[in-house]
Amino acid sequence: GIRMYVRRDGKLYRSNRKLENAFQIDLVDLREKRLFVAGGSVVDIERIGGWPNEEELVPLGFRISAATGNWRITDPVQAPAEPNLVGAWLNYIRGLKADTFANDRPDADLSKYGLEPPSLTIRVKNTSGGGSTLNVGTTANGGIVAQREGLPTGLRRDQGAQAVRDERT
C-alpha cells in the first residue's frame, strides 16, 4: 500500500491505517438504501396487489391491524393473526435494502420499472399516525424494483434475478 501522512496541529504524522479507504467511498455508498421504514409501534399493515407467476397474477392482498392490542386479520377474512409471524415479517421488510438505484430523475417513466402500476404495494401505519409505503414491480428481465414513497426508484435483486441496468441520467 501507499504511505499516508496527515498534518495536524502543525505536526506531520504517518497513518497506520488505510486512510485512503475513507476517500474511496462514493455517493451511492452514502445513500439511504432501506426500502422500507416503519418506525414506532406498528398498528396497521396493508398489502395490496399480487405477484406475477408465469401468465397469472397471484393475489397477495391482506390487511392486519393491532388497533385492539392484538394482531387481527381484517381483510380478506376476519381472524386472529399469529403475532410472532407478523413480527418476523415486519423485521424482514424493515431489513430490505436496495442494491443500487435505477433512476433518480423525478420525471422517470415508472412503467419501465414495473411500477406504473406496481404489482404490489405495502403500507404500514404506526401509533403516531405516520408510516411508510413501498411499491414493488418487476422488469421484463426478472429484476425486482421497489420504490419507497418520497424517494427515487431503488433496485433490489431477488434470488439471482437479472439486474436492471443502472441508468444514472
Image (tube, rainbow, N blue to C red):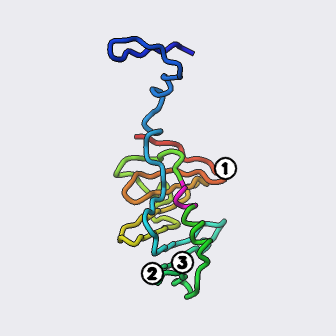
Is disc 1 surrounded by few (<14), some (14 to 19) or many (20+) residues within 10 Å? few
Q: Label 3 belongs to which residue?
A: 62
In the image, 21 versus 75, the foreground residue is 21
Task: Identify the residue shown where x is 43% and y is 43%.
Answer: 31
Helix, strand or loop under label 3: strand
Amino acid tagged 2: Ala
In-front residue for pair 55/67: 67
CA neighbours of label 2 inside 10 A, class few (<14), some (14 to 19), many (20+): few
Question: Residue at coordinates 48% horizontally, 13% vertically from top-left?
Answer: 14
Query: Marks 3 and 2, Cα distance to the nearest angstrom?
Result: 16 Å
User: Which disc number belongs to residue 67?
Assistant: 2
Q: Position of residue 150 (x, y in %)?
A: 36, 57
Residue 5: where, in percent of width, then height?
Answer: 45, 14
Above or below for 165 versus 87: above
Q: Nearer the viewer, mark 1 or mark 2?
A: 2
User: Is the residue marked by circle 3 packed among few (<14), some (14-19), or many (20+) residues within 10 Å?
Assistant: some
- Tell which circle, 1 or 2, labels the residue nearer the N-terminal end: 2
In the image shown, does 110 or 34 lie closer to the viewer?
34
Q: Amino acid at mark 1?
A: Gly
Asked which quadrant contains residue 126, the reply is bottom left
Residue at the bottom extreme of this rendering: 78
Q: Nearer the N terminus, badge 3 or badge 2?
A: 3
- Start-end of magenta stretch: 92-96
Q: Which residue is mark 1?
A: 160
What amino acid is labelled 3 in the image? Answer: Phe
User: Any magenta on residue 122?
Assistant: no
